[in-house]
Image: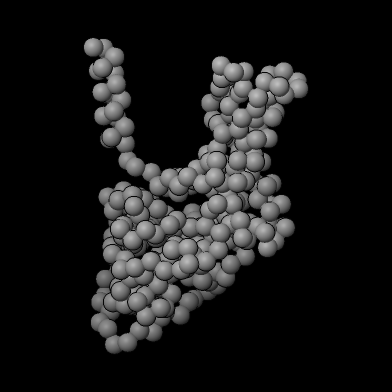
Amino acid sequence: MKAFHILAGLLCLALSLPAQVVQQTGAGQVDWQVRKIQATGIANPSVVGGRAGQIRAARADALRQILETVEGMLLTSETTVKDFMLENDVVYTEIRGVARNFQVVGDPVYMSDGSIELTVEMLLGRDFQDVLVGEMAFAEGSVTPVQFSDIHAGSDVYTGLIVDCRGLGIKPAMAPRVLSQSGEEIYGSSWADRDWTLAHGLAGYTRSVEQALENSDRIGGNPLRVKASAVTGSLQADAVIDDQSGKVLHALSENLTFLRECRVIFVVD
């Protein structure tokens, strides 16, 4: 009976925890909500050097798993990180250098067959962002709002943008965009400030609007909420919103400010 109550308590706790935006990629996983990669390195008992040798081998395997996970991530709606790395040897070398700074999570797990498992994490921090999106075109100074047809813009000042993409199958990416139904870019790397992008990423991801609203550090207290009508791009990472919402966003300089500061969250399934 005691065991039953413990299991029931654990189940209730699991159900009460907010769902994270976790993507299984290769042998590891990407948590887009907290912006980190987790992988597990394994070393068998035949490794030379005893336990210390196994730990070294498990760390080397963990690095391989992290790099494989990174390669499976989307850079944009048209390009994977792997594609980008294959095109540029320097990028691969720099990513490998950043990945070496992973942190071990907990103690090594010693399996019954004598093998060792080592769980590690790598944050998608400034150095990682710099390698992958640092060369993209970021806004310098003022940007020119998209010129729409005659649509009433409204006069509300917003502090951020929540794009509800649920039900559309959108995929997280390092550099997503928001487009209008007319095909104009409402938000993307060309609208973002470099320092804000490297520090926080071009966009955040959550599983619900409620989770997005709780992230007031990113989107402030009065974000504009928009329901995406479609996703686009060969890899389905860009969101499409209606022209009216695009006009509202680009109508006031205050709204352009929060776009430059990457105060954008995508809500995904």
Quick one: which residue is furthest to the top in this view?
Answer: 1
The residue shown at (53%, 26%) is: 106
Tell me residue 85's x, y (percent): 65, 57
Q: Residue at x 42, y 54 (%)?
A: 204
* Left or right: residue 168 compared with residue 122: left
* Number of marks: 0
Specify the quadrant that holds the N terminus: top left
| Model colouring | one colour
Left of 188 or right of it: where is 166? left
Q: Quadrant of residue 12?
A: top left
Q: Residue at x 32, y 87 (%)?
A: 149
Q: Is residue 46 found left or right of 228 in the rendered image? A: right
Residue at the farthest bottom position: 150
Confirm whether residue 196 shows in the render. no
**x and y percent of residue 267 in the render?**
34, 55
Residue 56 visible here: yes
Q: Residue at left 25%, top 18%?
A: 5
Give how far across and how far down residue 71 sits, in percent: 59, 52
Please provide percent x and percent y for residue 110. 58, 19
Q: Quarter-wise, where is residue 180 in the image?
A: bottom left
- Front position in the image: 115 or 93: 115
Task: Say which of 24 and 210 sits in front.
Answer: 24
Considering depth in this image, is 123 or 255 the residue closer to the camera? 123
46 left or right of 233 in image: right
